[in-house]
Image: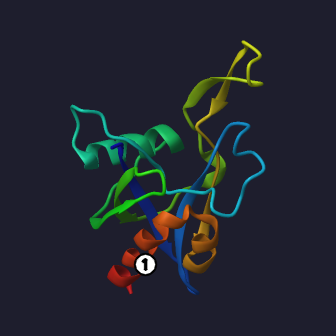
Amino acid sequence: MKKSAGLILYRRTKQQLEVLLVHPGGPIWAKRDEGAWSIPKGEISTEEEPLEAAQREFAEELGSSVQGALLALGSVIQKGGKVVQAWAVEGDLDVSSVKSNTFSMEWPPRSGREQEFPEIDRAAFFSLDEAKCKINPAQILLLDRLREQVH
């Protein structure tokens, strides 16, 4: 069973609580929106703790790190069986400055050509209600847990 860890960056505006979500890069996800977004997360390697993996993945996917008190949000199991463990931290980020690491894949399929794509192609803050429409459905529970802890 694959295990991932991630961080949810949240901020409070005068109107509401907002969370940062990321959209996966590459041609497979290019035209998908609702249900395609995610918290910044990635696989936990065998030699690291889940929280270390969450912090590393946040930095790799967004090009910056976050500081602050962490709220443990537990874990969820996604449709494919992957377990995602998450923490939340209050802060802000200029989404226009996001700089993601990249991955390679054969594209177009069966072409024999490897192309490089950003791991995430964009990041944005959403209200919790908007985020529930955008995020991978299995991760909605993490947003509910965040709402319970910060309101």
Query: Residue 48: percent from the left, percent from the top?
Result: 23, 37
Query: Residue 58: percent from the left, percent from the top?
Result: 44, 46
From the viewer's side, name the closer residue of 89 and 103.
103
Quarter holding the N terminus is top left
Outermost residue toward the top in this view: 112
**Taking the image as drawn, is residue 31 in sight?**
yes
Q: Residue at x 37, y 40 (%)?
A: 56
Q: Which residue is mark 1?
A: 144
Quarter holding the C terminus is bottom left
Q: Is residue 69 left or right of residue 35?
A: left
Q: Which color scheme is applied?
A: rainbow
Q: Residue at x 47, y 64 (%)?
A: 139
Q: Quarter of the image holding residue 103?
A: top right
For badge 1, the amino acid type reads Asp
- The relative height of residue 15 versus residue 121 in the rendered view (above or below) is below
Which structural element holds mark 1? helix
From the viewer's side, name the closer residue of 115 and 8.
115
Q: Is residue 50 left or right of residue 113?
A: left
Q: Residue at x 59, y 45 (%)?
A: 98
Q: Is residue 91 left or right of residue 131?
A: left
Q: How many marks?
A: 1
Query: Residue 81: percent from the left, percent from the top?
Result: 41, 52
